[in-house]
Amino acid sequence: LAGKGGGFKPGFTINPSINYARAGKGDLLSLNLAAGLVFNDKWTIGGFYNTSVNDFRPEKLTVAGTYADVRYGGLHLEYTMQANKVFHLSFPLQVGYGEIELDREEGMQQFGEEQFFVVKPGVMGEVNIHHNIRLQAGVNYRIASAFEYQNLSAADINTIGLQLGLRVGIFHKKQAAK
């Protein structure tokens, strides 16, 4: 991870993004926040949190006046190729644990929730717009472990997503060789 010369100081990045997916024949819009340490401007190791922001209404919902919430978090790993180029590719991998729950538009009726394990690999194109800011756009695929909840299943959220975000941080901070 240290590269030539062996000495380095890890950088740091914060990566807010928005993700759109067609899931369960409904539109699922979610916010994702990833943060982590950056090594040699190639490897990022950190954490992430993802939460739906719209009233996600899969076609299979059987309880009138309800919508689903999806959220998950965990480990964020990312490899960036040729980050010094204006345009380059990045390969994020998110692995974690999440939950889906049904909420009523009005009232306080509780429907419980269901947990699942999630893996989300992706491919992002990044543009360096400043030495500390990168604009990114790409695709990912969310894979959730098997669950059954209120007529919903993992198949309803296992889907391709489109992602748009910013990476802000100190990406590469090598120490001078002594």
Image (tube, grey):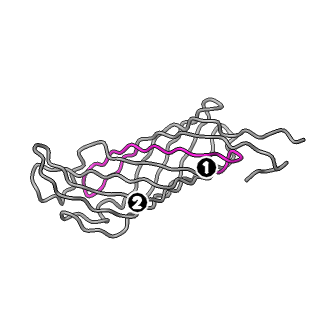
What residue lies at 58% left-to-right and 36% top-to-bottom?
Answer: 134
Q: Which percent across, then down, holds residue 60?
A: 18, 60
Contact? badges 1 and 2 (CB < 8 Å): no
Residue 141, placed above or below residue 4:
below
Q: Quadrant of residue 106?
A: top left
Task: Name the amino acid, label 2.
Answer: Tyr
Q: Which percent across, then down, holds residue 165?
A: 48, 39
Q: Which percent across, then down, holds residue 89?
A: 60, 48
Residue range in magenta is 19-43
Q: Is residue 69 magenta?
A: no
Q: CA distance from mark 1 to mark 2?
A: 20 Å
Q: Nearer the viewer, residue 132 or 101?
A: 101
SS class of the residue under badge 2?
strand
Which residue does the numbered mark 1 point to in the structure image? Answer: 44
SS class of the residue under badge 1?
strand
Left or right of 29 on screen, residue 82: right
Task: Name the amino acid, label 1.
Answer: Thr
Q: Nearer the viewer, residue 129 or 1?
A: 1
Which residue does the numbered mark 2 point to in the structure image? Answer: 97
What residue lies at 25% left-to-right and 68% top-to-bottom?
Answer: 148
Q: Which percent across, then down, holds residue 96?
A: 44, 59
Left or right of 25 on screen, residue 84: right
Structural crowding at the residue carrying mark 2, measured as other residues with C-alpha within 10 Å and reported as few (<14), some (14–19) or many (≥20): some
Quadrant placement of the C terminus: top right
